[in-house]
Amino acid sequence: MSTHSRLSLDRPPFRLDTDRLDQYLTISPAVITDLLRAAALQPGDTVLEIGAGTGLITRAIAARAGATIATELDRRFEPYLQRLHRRNGVSVHWADFRFSAPERVTAVVANPPFGVTEHLVDWLTQLPHLRRVALIVGQRFARAATAPPGSTQYTRLSLHLQAAFTSQLCGSIPPTNFYPPTRACAAILTLQPAAASPLLHALDAAVATTAGIRLHKLLYDLHGRDLLRGSLPALQDRLRPHLHRRIQQLTNAELSLTAHALLAANDEEISK
């Protein structure tokens, strides 16, 4: 029996880097099944996997998609992934995923290092043919991704992600479903590109700008562009405590209140 055939797909014979690389392998077949079900892949999909590891998820993707691009930085996984390369539509790239994904990618399915998930949003928006993303993420990221404006869990990440995607939480994953076990539960999260409210787009752009626009200036701008259909004076009254603050200086609680007030003002005007 060859050395390669004896390799364990869920317990590699080396210590994973849980500190610098956030390496936690998904070892539960049930979790992988749930992840692929959430991904809703189609035979013609070109799928990107971030952090292929031993290839457990790679194999599941390849059985459902037209092409699989598996990216991995840690060369210690080469004995596992080299036997998948150029088989069943799989190509393995030993590089950063941001430089390995061609424009034709239509789906992203992965258990990525939790440390990179917050940096994924901008990169995902640059994939012109992307239709669906299914990720295993930390609970904090999942809560922020799905938190509605006005809630205590709404953050800058919530605003930025929801300005480009709709998100859905598809279940919790206990720590023991990973090797080594994670410190806390994880979750399966799906994202789909979607056109958000122009108000959320404008607020997100104001947070990202270096100009330091103040909130009252943003409200006047939205009103002047006919994006704000509700009463401007009433909205100013709701947001008066931080009306003259720069957008970038708003706390998550203030940002949540602002996003909720903007959407509520328009909803109230529409319902009249």
Image (cartoon, rainbow, N blue to C red):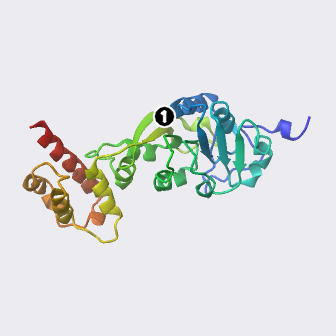
Amino acid at pointer 1:
Ser
The residue singled out by tag 1 in the image is 172
Residue 171 percent across, percent down from the top left: 47, 32
Q: In the visual, does 15 lie left or right of 51?
A: right
Residue 42 percent across, percent down from the top left: 57, 31
Mark 1, secondary structure of its residue: strand
Residue 69 appears in which quarter of the rendering?
A: top right
Q: Nearer the viewer, residue 20 or 191?
A: 191
Residue 167 percent across, percent down from the top left: 41, 40
Residue 90 in sight here:
yes
Image quadrant where one finds the N terminus: top right
Residue 213 appears in which quarter of the rendering?
A: bottom left
Q: Nearer the viewer, residue 140 or 75?
A: 75
Q: Nearer the viewer, residue 178 or 127?
A: 127
Query: Outermost residue toward the bottom?
Result: 211
Q: Nearer the viewer, residue 23 or 162?
A: 162
Q: In the visual, does 130 lie left or right of 220?
A: right
Tag count in the figure?
A: 1
Residue at (54, 54) in percent of width and height: 116
Residue at (44, 46) in percent of width and height: 140
Image quadrant where one finds the C terminus: top left
Whether residue 79 is situated above or below residue 21 in the rendered picture: above
Residue 54 in sight here:
no
Residue at (76, 40) in percent of width and height: 84
Residue 9 percent across, percent down from the top left: 74, 37
Q: In the visual, does 264 lie left or right of 19?
A: left
Density class for disc 1 (Cα within 10 Å; few <14, some 14-19, many ≥20) is some
